[in-house]
Each structure stands twice: as C-alpha cells, then as structure tokens.
Image: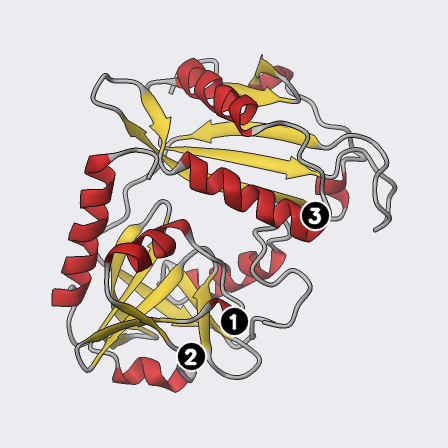
Amino acid sequence: MSAAPSVWINGELVATADAHLSPFDHGLTVGNGVFETMKVVTRPDGVPEAFALGRHLARLRRSAAGMGLPVELGDDQLRAAAHQVLAANTPGVGRLRITLTGGVGPLGSDRPAGPATVLLAVSGATPWPPTTAVSVVPWPRNEHSAVAGIKTTSYAENVVALQYAHDRGSSEALFANTAGDLCEGTGSNVFLAIDGRLTTPPLSSGCLAGITRELLLEVLDIDEVAHPLARLADADEVFLTSSTRDVHPVATIDGVAVPACPGPLTRAAAEAFAAIERRTVDP
C-alpha cells in the first residue's frame, strides 16, 4: 500500500491522518451503522477492483433499509468512490470496506436527524492458510433479533466469540441459533458435506446472506437445510465461505479432525468459485 494511505469520507478523498469523524457519530456511540467488506482483485488490464461490488452494494442497501438508515448516494457514486480510494492506495490493497453510519446523533439510541456518514477505506490482506480450525461458542445467535441477517457495525458479539476461538487455536467461531441449529461463523457461512450432498443453513437460521454463499448456491447443487448443531459430527467435509476466505476447508472442529479436508465436494466448490472469479470481477 502507498506510504500515505487515503480514505474516502463524505464525498472526498483525504489522507488517513486528516480524516475525522465526530465524537457524536452514531456509528461510534451506539453502533448504528452497516458495512460491506470486499476482496480486491486485479483486472487483466492491471486495474484493482472490488470483487462482486454490485452484489455488495445491493446488500448494503438491504442492511441499511433494515436499520432504517438512508443511503443518499447512488450506486454510481459509490462505485466511483470505490475506484478513487483503490487507485489512491495501490499497490498492496487486499480489501475494501464501505461503512455507512447514522451520522452525528445524540448520546443514546434516538435516531440522528442529520445526514449519514459514508466511509470507504482499504487495507492489505494476509492470505489464509490452506485449511483452518473452528471452535463452537457457547452463546447462540438470535435468529429472531431485529437485526438478524443484517450486516451491522454492532460487532461486539463477534469480537467476543472470535477471541474465544482464537484462545483455542481456531481462526473462526461457529454459532448455533436459539433453536440449537447450526447458524454461521462470526464473518463466514458454513457448509457441510453429508452423505454425498452439500448443505448450508437457510437464511431463516439467522445467518447472513453471504455473497460467496449466494454465488455458490447459483452454480452448485446445494441444499439449504436446518441441521442441529450436533450434526457437525456427522459431516464428511466442512468448509467456510466469505469474501476474504473464498472457499476455506475446515480441518478440525473443537480439536476433532474432520474426516476429509479438503474433500471432493469442497474442492468442487473451490473450483466453481475460482471459475466465477476468472469470468468477471462483478458477477
């Protein structure tokens, strides 16, 4: 990344050191915001671009609607902002994040009256290892929550869960929901191969509608099935998906080895996703 990184904030590109948010911004005080994180890929002409930007912008708008946040910029404006911040920070950019908050508001949960804050920032990305370990956390996702399935900036639950996993040598934490069914990771969707079939929890489980998950469901024969958490022990293969992990095989769950890592269905999913990336950066 360049020596003087820049961010795009509320309509202008500024040096990171000169970027300022109000101490009363609702994203800071109460976590009233939504966001999207995208992997940055390089087009054949050498230009960096956010992968699946159109799908991420659509989900940003769905999340904002679920939070009651206005999105005052059109997709063309957000795309232009993404191109500006990527161009200003190459090389070395691995991910792009768009954050939308409620803007300046009261020190409480009442809605701000002013305009939203829009921030685009980039960072490098450390490659994931070929396989990973996960830990199941003791706290459930609430699939009945007002913000279930919304990608909000209120990530404290994920921070605690991920630290629980890290303390046990894992890179990701898995949640059940209040019904005791498998739900998702802190920043990933989970897939199981059982009896020769790929399955993943349905959105009704409370999981996020992941972009990588969405793309795989469009090109592969995958069942959306509500599995009791204990069904993890029956899986022949397990993998995670996210915008930075792509298809990431799971080697162990709570220290117990998964039978095949990666197995044939995991490899097929990885190949299918790689083929999507080769075809276009904005599927």
80 or 17, which lies in front?
80
- Residue 35's tag is none
Q: Relative to 49, is 26 above or below?
A: below
Residue at the spot of label 1: 204
Quadrant for residue 132, please give it. bottom left
Cα distance between the residues tagged 3 and 1: 24 Å
Q: In the figure, is residue 226 to the left or right of 112?
A: left
Q: Residues within 10 Å of mark 2 (few under 14, many from 20)?
A: some
Residue at the spot of label 3: 31
Q: Residue at x 35, y 75 (%)?
A: 254
Cα distance between the residues tagged 2 and 3: 30 Å
Residue 131, percent from left and from top = 22, 58
The amino acid type of the residue labelled 2 equals Ala
Q: Relative to 86, is 99 above or below?
A: below
Residue at the spot of label 2: 226
198 or 94, which lies in front?
198
Q: Quadrant of the C terminus?
A: top left
Residue 21, percent from left and from top = 71, 27
**Disc 3, disc 1: CB below 8 Å?**
no
Query: Which numbered mark, 3 or 1, is in the foreground of this view?
Result: 1
Cα distance between the residues tagged 1 and 2: 9 Å
Quadrant for residue 123, please give it. top left
The amino acid type of the residue labelled 1 equals Ser
Which of the marked residues, 1 or 2, is nearer the chain's N terminus?
A: 1
**Disc 1, disc 2: CB below 8 Å?**
yes
The amino acid type of the residue labelled 3 equals Gly
